[in-house]
Image: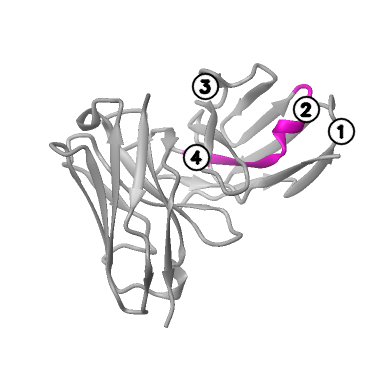
Amino acid sequence: EVQLLESGGDLVQPGGSLRLSCAASGFTFSSYAMSWVRQAPGKGLQWVSGISGSGGGTHYADSVKGRFTISRDDSKNTLFLQMNSLSAEDTAVYYCAKGSYSSLSRNWFDPWGQGTLVTVSS
Amino acid sequence: DIQMTQSPSSLSASVGDRVTITCRASQSITNYLNWYQQKPGKAPKLLIYGASSLQVGVPSRFSGSGSGTGFTLTISSVQPEDSATYYCQQSYSAYTFGQGTKLEIK
């Protein structure tokens, strides 16, 4: 069974940093693109970032470009999201999701993890 | 950026009703359109990919259609467990979600 388990969410002050992790199991992690998708409280879904199966390609939403960095450790079947210069607008539940292909583009996402909550507040 | 617009934003249906949710893209996305279901406090679940392909394990009362800029998700006979918010997502150029459609069962 494919499983994704996020961790690292916390309360952080504006301007602070946080690193999220997503532990994957039940599939050949290195062969699939992975993404982070967030959902602000009471709001819809927003794609944040994606990384190809090889790790050679990454892509970011404009709202996080230059502040967030996606990476993966295929030896540990783990996806990461390093978040810097956080603001209140980054407050959300962050989900990791498995892509359907190794390439970065044109994936559907299945499954998703249960999410981890990031709260940015003073 | 490609914008996705869903309609309606919310709807109420009775058990057994046929329900249709519409998703429109701001430019052609051919068939790179996916549908997800999200229940309160839970992660989204993939229902339909490639505009019309039913994900394994999803009940056959769900179906998707469309191409280009217009797409629909249809539930042929709504069940109580279908109460959820439904999102479309384009994967033609990066990824964008619609704003969601909340389905309430009367």
Q: Chain of mark 3?
A: B
Q: Which residues fall within the magenta stretch?
A: B76-90
Residue B92 vs residue B4: left or right? left
Residue located at (40% from left, 75% from top): A87
**Between discs 1 and 2, the one toward the N terminus:** 1
Q: Secondary structure at mark 1?
A: loop
Q: Callout 3 environment at 10 Å: few (<14), some (14 to 19), or many (20+)?
A: some
First in residue order: circle 4 vs circle 1: 1
Q: Residues within 10 Å of mark 4 (few under 14, many from 20)?
A: many
Amino acid bearing label 4: Gln
Q: Residue lying furthest left in this view?
A: A75
In the picture, the disc for residue B78 is: 2
Residue underneath mark 4? B90
Separation of marks 1 and 2 at Cα, in angstroms: 7 Å
Q: Which residue is mark 3?
A: B55
Instruction: Specify the label residue A11 is tagged with.
Output: none
Q: What distance separates the C-alpha of mark 4 from that of mark 3?
A: 16 Å
- Residue on which disc 1 sits: B14
Identity of the residue drawn at 53% across and 43% down: B27
Alpha carbon separation for disc pair 2 and 4? 25 Å
- Sequence-wise, which precedes: disc 3 or disc 2? 3
The scheme the figure's colours follow is one colour
Residue A19 sits in which quadrant?
bottom left
Q: Are marks 4 and 1 in contact (CB under 8 Å)?
A: no
- Find residue A16 and report its horizontal and vertical position in percent: 30, 76
Say which of marks 2 and 4 sits in front: 2
